[in-house]
Image: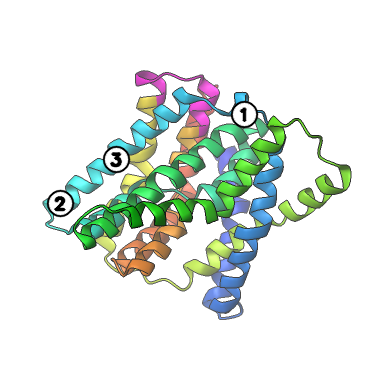
Amino acid sequence: MLAIFLKTLPFFAIIGLGYWAGRTKFFSQEATAYLTKFVFYFALSAMLFRFAANLSLVEVLDWPLVGAYLLGTLAIYLLATGIAFLRRLDIPTAAIEAQCAVIGNVGFLGVPMLVLLLGERAIGPVMLVLAVDLIVFSSLIVILITGSRDGRMSFAILRTVGLGLLRNPMIVAISSGLIWSALEIPIPAPLNEFLALLGAAATPGALFAIGASLAAIAAERVQVAAWLSFCKLVLHPAAVAIAALWIIPIDPYSAAVVISAAALPVAGNVYILAQHYGVAPHRASAAILLSTVVSIGTVSAVIAWVGTLT
């Protein structure tokens, strides 16, 4: 485990550097917002497109893997929702808590870290995990919050969800890359170099942006944050492991990747959604901060464990 910890430490060290820069105001919130936008729309999109363009859809699309990850994730989503209802929370707040319990930082942290630690074969499974999170659960939270406020489902809600997916650069980059691959068009050398150069900025830029953004959020409602962090860092990978190893068995390597992806800390976009809808933003921010700090140890432990599966 020590060897894995030492390999993951540089990733978290860059997050820590970003946190220091944001905390000392060396990096302003405005600067963090622009860095995040650069990574989200340009660097990470270039990385994902280049990865996807060099894969075939047949190799990537693994329905048992999707089923195993979806089953394990849905189990913890329902658990977190049920606990929220027992505490007499309303539907929007319960939806935010459930999102914290299962949506990890796969785009900004998982893609660069897991591909480096587990090898390039991890690209396909990680992309499927990212697609499930974005298409299923990011859509579900919009439907639950908007539908509960309107008191009914409407075409407008579905239209909002659909447009949100079409405008998400990660979805666009992955889809475009797979289409490019399906057409069997070779990537011209100058374009490939351009994508490689731009995509190389995604890893340090994303990690630094995570840290800088953490410096601006408040750690309130620590008890709730501890529960949600426990769900995300312990229960979520455990549920995905049960689903991927025993209920819907998939190959050991793919299982190792999706379990590792499930062990990642709460994603920053949960806070963005909470802030956008005005639903428990401090609760989400505390869960993100606490889970990120604790994950320095837990992610290494999970990756060390899944290494015994392959």
User: Which residue is denoted by mark 1 in the rendering?
Assistant: 57
Viewer-proximal residue among 191 and 17? 191
- State how the image is colored: rainbow
Task: Give how far across and how far down residue 295 sits, in percent.
Answer: 45, 50
Q: Residue at x 35, y 33 (%)?
A: 72
Q: Is residue 100 visible?
A: no
Q: Is residue 209 visible?
A: yes
Q: Label 3's element?
A: helix
Disc 1 packing (10 Å; few <14; some 14–19; many ≥20): some
Left of 166 or right of it: where is 31?
A: right
Q: Residue at x 28, y 54 (%)?
A: 154
Viewer-proximal residue among 257 and 39? 39
User: Which residue is denoted by mark 2 in the rendering?
Assistant: 85
**What is the distance, in whole Å, between disc 3 and disc 2 at their CAs?**
14 Å
**What is the distance, in whole Å, between disc 2 and disc 1 at their CAs?**
40 Å
The amino acid on which the numbered mark 1 sits, given as a three-letter code, is Leu
Q: Which residues are magenta?
A: 244-257
- The image shows a total of numbered marks equal to 3
Left of 206 or right of it: where is 131?
A: left
